[in-house]
Amino acid sequence: MSVNLTLQERLRQQHQAESETLQNLTKEQLNSLRSELNDIFQHELNTMRSDMRQQLRDTSKELRDNRQGLLNKFIIHRLAIPTLSTALILLVIYMSGWVVTLYQGRQIEENGALIRQQNTTLANLANRTGGLDIVQETSGLFVVLPKEAKAEAGWKIGNNAALKITR
């Protein structure tokens, strides 16, 4: 029995040694696996962080571009176009007023020249008629003499009766 006991003892010691070796190898493998998993996790975490940062940068840039585009549209549609339209309308009104003023100025000059011509013609007619006026009234047709003028009857010019006017 003692041989059995020694064999049993050796087997148990061998089993224990193998068990410890297996446990140590398993621990080493688990530690190695844990280290690899931590490295993979850190790498993936870093990749996700950098992807998120890049996505945040891209989104921020896109928002800035959109904001700039909206600002440009606002400036163009809300400020520039109404301002230019107003300026164009005011320019058209100003130019129209200027053209009307030029036209009316020329009309006034032409009317002034016509009035001067008519006054000259009227003065010539007054000189030719000796200041006589012919007036039609209900009681008949009259020749009105200028002030301080007298008419003498009994005169003839050709076969027609005439009045001689003296002043």
Image: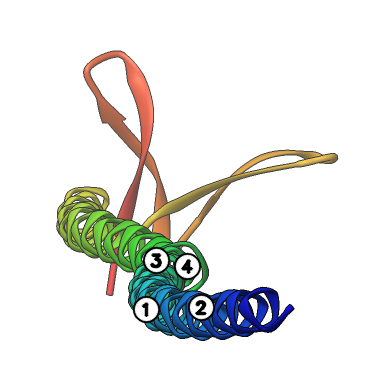
Question: Mark 3, mark 1: which one is toward the viewer?
Answer: 1
| Mark 2 closeness class: few <14, some 14–19, many ≥20 residues within 10 Å | few
* Three-letter residue code for mark 4: Leu
- Mark pair 4, 1: CA separation: 56 Å
139, 57: nearer the viewer = 57
Q: Please tell me which residue lies in front, 81 or 19.
A: 19
Q: Report the Cα–Cα distance between label 2 and label 4.
A: 81 Å
The C terminus, quarter of image: bottom left
Q: Give the residue at x 56% y 78%.
A: 19
Which of the two marks, 4 or 1, is nearer to us in this view? 1
Q: Earlier in the sequence, mark 4 or mark 3?
A: 3
Residue 123: quarter of image:
bottom left
Q: Nearer the viewer, mark 2 or mark 4?
A: 2
* Residue bearing mark 4: 70
Q: Position of residue 54 (x, y in %)?
A: 33, 72
3 displayed left or right of 58: right
Question: Of circles 4 and 3, which is in front?
Answer: 3
User: Which residue is identified by label 1?
Assistant: 32
Question: What's the residue type where badge 2 is placed?
Answer: Gln
Residue 58 x %, y %: 35, 68
Pointers 2 and 4 in contact (CB under 8 A)?
Answer: no
